[in-house]
Image: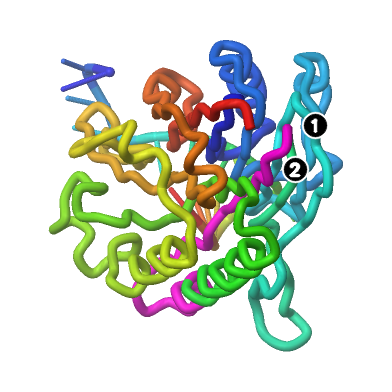
DNA sequence: ATGGTCGACGCTCGA
């Protein structure tokens, strides 16, 4: 089974490219982030015509996550237990940043971790809270079933090691590489979810995101921030992974490239 | 790749 994750940066703008990606690589399940639309705006038909079912959650033009599958789509869950809301008091609202579904016997989570914005922005605390809640939820899922194959796939907005950024100096004083964010990422690893892609996509210079500005992509100035973290029952089934860097090329590219993971039959 | 970002509910914000 082949699963993948991709921050598509607007599904309405990029639906043709996403469906072509699914077909070109024979992908069974795709976790999408930043669909940037409401459920009623999601372009379902091109996916259905290609043989895929879609579960999506999106409340407005921001965020939005989906799971696209041609091997079943069961037990769809919007958000996870304890997922923080954004805002205060009456304005507190859940954002469309997490969606779970069981596809071909694998529990897939499409996750869009909050950006953080800056080291002194309330969004950074939200990001850390969100990751703490995810760690606790994940710990609970593994307590229920230690052998469950679970894939936490998405845009983590964290570069876990110095090797995962084009310049350590550039990111000093910025988000994505701070000790607090890296500790929050490691917290999810510590409860049993391992990065299953790195050993198959070694660095340095291996990235999944390149800023649109400053010719970052041709200059190879990127970050590795998109990951599949697998439970033990998932990790032992991983037989390969790759980053489809070609998807960052050309006109109409997302600023993220897809990450693809191959699993043995369960 | 030969310039200088892109997407959205856009005259501004979020990434």
Q: Chain of mark 2?
A: A
The segment highlighted magenta reads A104-127
**SS for callout 1:** loop
Would residue A237 be seen by someone viewing this image from the given angle? yes
Is residue A29 positioned above or below A140 on the image?
Answer: above
Q: Circle 2: is it few (<14), some (14-19), or many (20+) Cα within 10 Å?
A: many
Residue at image point 64% right, 50% down: A148
Who is closer to the viewer here, A62 or A130? A130
Task: Name the residue carrying label 1.
Answer: A72
Would residue A212 be seen by someone viewing this image from the given angle? no
Measured from the top left, where is residue A177 in percent x and y?
Answer: 28, 62
Is residue A25 positioned above or below A89 on the image?
Answer: above
Disc nearer the start of the sequence (1/2) = 1
Image quadrant containing the N terminus of chain A: top right
Q: Is residue A123 magenta?
A: yes
Residue at image point 62% right, 39% down: A32
Image quadrant containing the C terminus of chain A: top right
Is A230 left or right of A101, judged from the image as shown?
Answer: left
Is residue A258 positioned above or below A39 on the image?
Answer: above
Measured from the top left, where is residue A212 in percent x and y?
Answer: 37, 38
Residue at image point 37% right, 25% down: A245
Q: Is residue A91 magenta?
A: no
Q: Chain of mark 1?
A: A
Residue at image point 49% right, 73% down: A123
Q: CA distance from mark 1 to mark 2?
A: 7 Å
Is A146 left or right of A259, judged from the image as shown?
Answer: right
């Amino acid at each position: 089974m082949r699963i993948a994750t991709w921050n598509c940066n607007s599904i309405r703008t990029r639906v043709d490219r996403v469906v072509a990606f699914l077909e070109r690589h024979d992908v069974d399940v795709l976790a999408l982030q930043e669909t940037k639309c409401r459920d009623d705006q999601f372009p379902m038909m091109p996916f259905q015509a290609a043989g895929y079912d879609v579960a999506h959650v999106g409340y407005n033009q921001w965020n939005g996550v989906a799971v696209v599958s041609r091997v079943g789509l069961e037990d769809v869950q919007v958000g996870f237990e304890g997922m923080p809301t954004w805002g205060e008091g009456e304005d507190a609202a859940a954002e469309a940043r997490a969606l779970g579904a069981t596809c071909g016997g694998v529990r897939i989570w499409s996750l869009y971790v909050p950006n953080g914005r800056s080291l002194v922005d309330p969004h950074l605390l939200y990001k850390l809270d969100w990751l703490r809640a995810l760690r606790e939820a994940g710990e609970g899922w593994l307590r229920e079933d230690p052998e469950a194959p679970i894939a936490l796939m998405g845009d983590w907005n964290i570069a876990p090691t110095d090797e995962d950024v084009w310049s350590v100096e550039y990111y000093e004083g910025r988000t994505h590489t701070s000790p607090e964010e890296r500790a929050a990422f490691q917290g999810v690893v510590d409860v049993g979810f391992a990065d299953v892609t790195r050993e198959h996509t070694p660095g340095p210079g291996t990235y999944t995101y390149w800023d649109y500005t400053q010719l970052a992509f041709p200059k190879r100035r990127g970050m590795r921030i998109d990951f599949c973290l697998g439970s033990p029952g998932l990790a032992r089934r991983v037989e390969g992974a790759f980053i489809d860097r070609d998807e960052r090329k050309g006109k109409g590219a997302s600023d993220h490239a897809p990450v693809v993971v191959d699993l043995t039959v369960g």
